[in-house]
Image: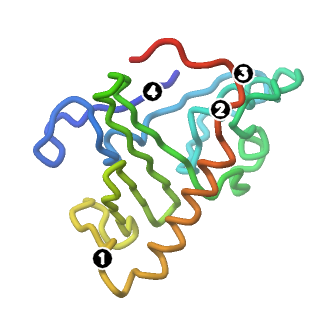
Amino acid sequence: FTSDHGELFGDHGLWLKGPFYYEGLINTPLQLAGPDVPEGQVSEALISALDIGPTLCDLAGVPQMPFMDGVSQKPHIEDPDYKCRSQCLVEYHTGYGENDISSKCLVTETLKYVRYETGQEELTDLADDTSENRNVAEDSHYYGKCNSMRNALLDEILATEQKGPEQVSHA
């Protein structure tokens, strides 16, 4: 059981979904059940929706398709202290052709970096600002962290460029 996105329900004065990356939208539930999945195990680990396919393949003992970008979470299921990911890429596209709005986000356990197609940046220190009310991207104390997250986002984008079939529909 999972979802492709959450809902805001008034978080930050906003409703529904949209080009935002608040935890209420991107921190979605994932429930797994099966012979190799312990009952009642709860995790706060970084897991991407892209990891579902590789994880199910690994649990079923079948090879992962070469165009899958995710990583198997089976090692984390077997050992909850093992972390398969240090970051997750989150993307938003409206899919409206020339009116498309595009942005990308990179989340770690303690930081969230967002880059909009306009060049605008957001950096949230999730450890210090759990309500996600302060953008510290231009704060001089965060210069190194912002630059590091910017570079990590670029690396992640390049590593996950389209490998499989072209997308033909949009939500």
| Residue that mark 1 sits on | 138
Q: Earlier in the sequence, mark 3 or mark 4?
A: 4
Compared to residue 79, the image places residue 143 above or below, namely: below
> Looking at the picture, how far across and down is residue 144, in whole percent?
48, 81
- Sequence-wise first label, 2 or 4: 4
Q: Residue at x 46, y 40 (%)?
A: 91
- Crowding around mark 4 (Cα neighbors within 10 Å: few <14, some 14 to 19, many 20+) is few
Q: Quadrant of residue 8?
A: top left
Which mark is in front, 2 or 4? Answer: 2
34 displayed left or right of 147:
right
The reply to whether callout 3 and callout 4 are in contact (CB within 8 Å) is: no
| Above or below: residue 39 compared with residue 133 | above
For the residues marked 3 and 1, what is the alpha-carbon distance in whole angstroms?
A: 46 Å
Q: Is residue 133 rendered to the left or right of residue 60?
A: left
Q: Secondary structure at mark 4?
A: loop
Q: Residue at x 57, y 57 (%)?
A: 154
The Cα–Cα distance between marks 3 and 4, rounded to whole angstroms, is 21 Å
The residue to which callout 4 is attached is 4
Q: Nearer the viewer, mark 2 or mark 3?
A: 2
Q: Earlier in the sequence, mark 3 or mark 1?
A: 3
Q: Tag 2: residue type?
A: Gln
CB atoms of marks 1 and 2 within 8 Å:
no
Q: Amino acid at mark 1?
A: Glu
User: Residue under circle 2?
Assistant: 162
| Tag 3 secondary structure | loop
Q: Considering depth in this image, is 117 or 11 the residue closer to the camera?
A: 117
Quarter of the image that includes the C terminus: top left
Q: Using the rendered view, name the quadrant where residue 167 is placed.
A: top right
Say which element carries label 1: loop
